[in-house]
Each structure stands twice: as C-alpha cells, then as structure tokens.
Amino acid sequence: MEPAYRRIAAAYRDRIASGELGPGVRLPTEHEIAEQFGVVRQTVRSGLGVLVSEGLIVARRPHGYFVREWERMLYRPQEKSRPMPSRSTMDRFSQQISDEGRVPSMHIEVALVQAAPDLAERLRVEAGATVVIRRRVRFINGEPVNINDSHFPLELVKDSEIMSPAYIPRGTDEVLADLGHRQERAVDEIFVRMPAPDEIRRLGLGPGTPVAVHYDTGYTADDRPVQCTVNVLPGDRHRIVFERRWRADEPLS
Amino acid sequence: MEPAYRRIAAAYRDRIASGELGPGVRLPTEHEIAEQFGVVRQTVRSGLGVLVSEGLIVARRPHGYFVREWERMLYRPQEKSRPMPSRSTMDRFSQQISDEGRVPSMHIEVALVQAAPDLAERLRVEAGATVVIRRRVRFINGEPVNINDSHFPLELVKDSEIMSPAYIPRGTDEVLADLGHRQERAVDEIFVRMPAPDEIRRLGLGPGTPVAVHYDTGYTADDRPVQCTVNVLPGDRHRIVFERRWRADEPLS
DNA sequence: CAGTGGTCTAGACCACCTA
DNA sequence: AGGTGGTCTAGACCACTGT
C-alpha cells in the first residue's frame, strides 16, 4: 500500500500532467484535501511538499497552492562569440529583451576577492589569489532572471573601466580586447544542481527550482585564460540553445 | 527569530560547505540532533528534509544520513558531430567509459509510439504521428547514468537495423547516413528541471537530484530533421562541456 | 532484537493578507 | 475578523537491516 502522502502527490501530479489543472490554477486548501483523502493536515502537507519540491506547484500564502507557470528565455552561449552590431547602444542581453518588448535592467557590483578554488583553476591563478569580480544580476520587468559573475585576474584589468560598477554597453570582452587580451576561444561548462541559499536570495527562487551553472572561460590566441564568467540560470526561466555542424577534425580541448 | 528547522538546516549546510563534514560522512541520528537543538524529532526531520531536497545529504535507512558524494562524467555534445574512429568496435559512450577503466553497459528497447508534442514539433511531424523510439539507459559499473531516447520518423527507418533493439556500434547516425539521410547540422537545447517519477525510477535518482534534458535534433543538408534524441542527464552525475571559437558571422538558426 | 528512518495522528499557536 | 499556509509538540506504529 502506497503511503497516503504519495497518493495525494500522485493524484495532483497526474491532474497537472494531464492538463486538467493548468498553469496558474488554484488547488483546494490543505483542509479540503485532508477531508477528501481522510487524513490529517500534516499528511496533506507532506504530499503537497513533494510537488513543491518537484517544482510543480507553489504556495502563496494566504491564497493557497497554485500550479506553477513557466516562462523560459532563450539563452545562447554561442552568441557571446559573435561580433556585436556596431551601432548597438546596449549589451546583448538588454538588446534581446528590448526586442521582445520587455524592460531589461541590471544591478552591477565590482569587488576584489580571493579566487575560489573552481575559479582559480579555470583562470590558472593560485587559489586565494586576488581577482576582480564583476557581479551582475539581470532583471526583466523588474524580476531577476539570472546572475552573471565575471572574474578577471587583477593585473589584467586594474585601472580599466571594468573596475567601475557601471554599465559597459560594448561588453567587457571588448574592453579586454582593447587592453590587448582579445579572446579567441572559450570553453563552456554546464552543471546542474540545486541552488545555494544566497543564490535563492539573489534570484528570488521558489523551492524546487534547480539551476544551471554555466562557466564561460575565455582564452586568448596564446591560450591564456583572461576571464571566467559564472552564469547562474534558474531552470524554470531558461532554455539553453546552441548549434553544431559536422566537421572532420576540429580539436576539442 | 529563524524557525528551528531552518537553523538546523543552516547548521549542517554550513558544516558541509566548510568541509568539516566531507562527502560520505555520517550525520548524527535524528534523535541526537533533536536533543542537541532541544526540539522534537519531527522538527529535525523538516530541517534535514531541506538539505535532502537541496541534494546535500541522503538518508540511508537504517544507517542514518550521509553527506552526498558527487562524481560527474564528462558529457560533450560536440563530440556527436565528429567522425568515429573507424576501427572502433564500441559507440562513443562505451569507448569513453572503457578508456576510464570502468564497465559500460546499456539497456535498449525499441517501440513505435505517437509523437509527444515536443517531439512532433522538433521532427516536424503532426502531433500524434507514429515515430520510432529507441530507448536506451546507459550504465557505468551497473549504475544507471543517463537516458537517451532517440526518435525517428517512421518512414525513414522502417526495415532498417534501427528497428531492432540491438547494439549498433557505429551509431544510429551512420545508419541514417547509409539510408541517405546524412546529418549536417544539429540544434542542441538544454532544459533544467526536476525529474518526473518515471525518470526517477529509470535512473534510480535520489530526492533532490535535478536533471538536465538535452534535445539533440539533427538535420540533413536540405534542412529536414531526421532524428531527435532526448538525453536525460542526472545533475549529480554529469558535467556538460563544449567549446567555442570566435567567428564573424556564422548564422544561428 | 535493537536501532534507524518513514509515516501518521491530534492537536496548538503563529504570521500574513484580504475582505 | 477570518482564512490561509508555516511551524511545532508529543506521542504512536511501521519496515528495514545489521548483529
């Protein structure tokens, strides 16, 4: 016999999967469900808790539980290595969102920090070495959608405009290029995991929302890493897309 | 005042993050934690439940809670569009795992199904049209690591060896090419979400494990989609890597 | 058999928001 | 003021596994 809380979870999971309960629809209250299934409220809570942690429903107190609504923005890592339209007054993200008729905004913060082990490895500096971190949170219509923390070895960018927490429309890649560190190659790594508490806070994530973590490490022609950007993408708000063509023998590092 | 269950979660989250509790280490029992924090067992369970759903710990009854251990295999979508070493007797996955000194295995199942909406769209067939689905679960040392469900329009592959649930060392892409449907371009899409119950079952996933879903849609030179493979990658077992080079103007569809 | 986590009951009080 | 979900207590019984 399946436990009651699982039966409750399965019942509502099925109704959501079948479309009987569409996005945004409200579920009965915990009391009502408890009565229907002949259990106490705590058991209902366990069952709905499963669905919350699966990301299928959200609790909005004091309104009740609602079927979650998804909307995913296009995320194309390959766009990063194409030239920007020269007349553009906005960075790629802002341009894309504006084109869709929505309002982009950004919060920027610059700091000097000791490189965490994962970044030290990718930037090929010693663990604990000082790096410049340019933290950005991007918003659409005021809602946070992703985090982009770019890291640079300190010597490369000190005294450049990268150190100022201001908007750089042409992008930091261009600034690096002007400084003599033009990137020619990048390695993209994607990890999937549950968010840490500070990521939940910065992105306003609901429970049950996993994130994709995208490391973009850029190399110059002589194979020095000059920047590593950590993008944290909430799973419910992104669709990562890239394209391949068949080739004979291009090396993969 | 923070709720007790959150304080408990935070306490152990910190100890795990700091490395004080390394991978595989056992936590105190629920009773012991309850005593330490002066709360009842149910409250401890709520706290540890948070960490379980964050994927930080696992419960192994009747042994206790343990800090989760991670091991990630390399997943490189771009490898798919490179020629296979002609002397290879194994597919790419099996070769990679063998090279690492581990034992690959696979479960294969072929069926005719009605195309789900997401696949119908990608294969450009009508929703509900019959497609061939070649379901595979891949194992390393007997442990399931990912799901690969390849979908083909029925007319393209009927009477070919793709219809047989047997191992095809050279890969289905080669079979398609032999049938006159050589792929020249592919679109990769990655979504991040929590797994559905049947994915949890097939992959033996623990609670709190998100998945990356990778759609690989292959097109011929005349831009017809000939296959769409849905790869379900447990977040705790994969690291997705690809590479970019700067180019002037290659079109992205 | 002892000890673990898994499930469940029957209550209670709280914070928060809307009406 | 009333109803929502959020938290917590104090118990109880169960299934599973190793000794």
Image (tube, coloured by chain):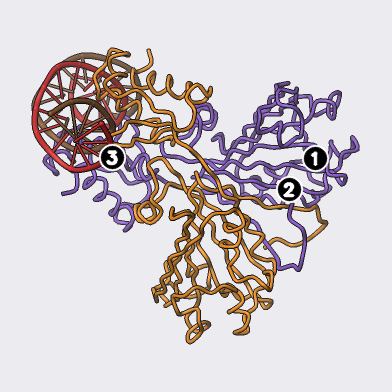
Chain colours: A orange, B purple, C red, D brown
Distance from disc 2 to disc 1, alpha carbons, whole Å, reads 9 Å
Name the residue carrying label 1.
B173
Question: Residue at 34% across / 18% down in the picture?
Answer: A3
Tell me the amino acid under the disc marked 2.
Lys
Tell me the amino acid under the disc marked 3.
Leu
Q: Which element carries disc 2, helix, strand or loop?
A: helix
Distance from disc 2 to disc 3, alpha carbons, whole Å, reads 41 Å
Q: Nearer the viewer, residue B79 or B106?
A: B79
Evaluate whether label 2 is on the same chain as label 3.
Answer: yes
Left-right relation of B160 to D18: right
- State yes or no: discs 2 and 1 in contact (Cβ < 8 Å): yes
Name the residue carrying label 3.
B48
Q: Position of residue D4 (x, y in %)?
A: 27, 29
Q: Which element carries disc 3, helix, strand or loop?
A: helix
Name the residue carrying label 2.
B80
Q: Position of residue A126 (x, y in %)?
A: 46, 75
Left-right relation of A208 to C10: right
Tell me the amino acid under the disc marked 1.
Asp
Residue A116's image quarter? bottom left
First in residue order: circle 2 vs circle 1: 2
Label 1: chain? B
Label 3: chain? B
First in residue order: circle 1 vs circle 3: 3
Question: Residue at 31% across / 27% down in the picture?
Answer: A46
Q: For the residue carrying disc 3, how many other residues have a C-alpha within 10 Å: few (<14), some (14-19), or many (20+)?
A: many
Evaluate whether label 2 is on the same chain as label 1.
Answer: yes
